[in-house]
Image: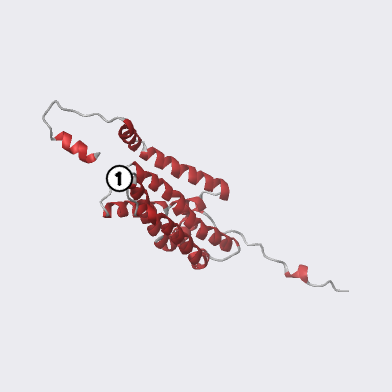
Amino acid sequence: MAEIERIVSELPQGIGYEWTGLSYQERVASGQAAGLFGLALLVVFLLLVALYESWAIPLVVMLIVPVGALGSVLAVTAVGMPNDVYFKVGLITIIGLAAKNAILIVEFAKELWDQGHSLRDAALQAARLRLRPIVMTSLAFILGVVPLTLATGAGAASQRAIGTGVIGGMLSATLLGVILVPIFFVWVLSVLRRKPHVQQVDDDKHLPEKQ
């Protein structure tokens, strides 16, 4: 569509064009992409707030989403694909996938922190223990999307756009996420929250009563 618009712009004055059918729908949808992307971010964030009953933990999770989005943009740009509506569908998908990887680390780090570990130790232990599950689930998803990037025939362009964007986003969210999520966890919680009070056990309660 961009190439057609470029060619038409070079025609003599007085000659115009008009999009119809699916092309018109794609053009209209492309103008709504920013709003849909923002709405998806808001929905995921509010769901996490309701789940954790906290603003800090969801913020840690959402900070990794731009990393996944950047990977999608770089992957599509590297292969010369247009920033069309199909790519935007994959970009919205990356919001949930990137958040999923971050939750695997944040959930475990929060449990360790609540048990009395320092923020740094909790984040490092969570990243180390959750590394294998994150890599395996992400690799399985990436391999499942590879056929989209190799699609041929009718509709192949849309499949390749979605597949390439999702793979790029998953690679960046996985490889960089295991490093950045612990950093975000320590930074955000050290700024927004105090260390939880760890209940001390009174040893006297466990001593046998004297006769």
In this picture, residue 193 sits left or right of residue 39: right
SS at badge 1: loop
Please tell me which residue is depicted at 47% across the width and 53% down the height of the picture.
99
Please tell me which residue is depicted at 48% across the width and 66% down the height of the picture.
131
* Quadrant in which the C terminus appears: bottom right
Crowding at dot 1, Cα within 10 Å, few <14 / some 14-19 / many 20+, comes out as some
Please tell me which residue is depicted at 56% across the width and 62% down the height of the picture.
113
**Residue 33 at x, y percent in the picture:** 36, 39
**Residue 41 at x, y percent in the picture:** 44, 44
* Quadrant in which the N terminus appears: top left
In this picture, residue 199 sits left or right of residue 54: right
Query: Farthest residue in the bottom direction?
Result: 211
Residue 78 in which image quadrant: bottom left
Query: Farthest residue in the top direction?
Result: 14
- Between 34 and 27, the one nearer to me in the picture: 27
- Between 54 and 147, the one nearer to me in the picture: 147
Residue 23 in which image quadrant: top left
Q: Tag 1: residue type? A: Asn
Q: Is residue 21 above or below residue 101?
A: above
In this picture, residue 147 sits left or right of residue 17: right
Query: Farthest residue in the front direction?
Result: 153
**Residue 178 at x, y percent in the picture:** 44, 63
Query: Farthest residue in the left direction?
Result: 12
- Between 161 and 204, the one nearer to me in the picture: 161
- Between 8 and 109, the one nearer to me in the picture: 8
**Residue 79 at x, y percent in the picture:** 27, 54
Question: What count of labels does the image hold?
Answer: 1
What residue would you read off at disc 1?
83
Q: How is the image coloured?
A: secondary structure
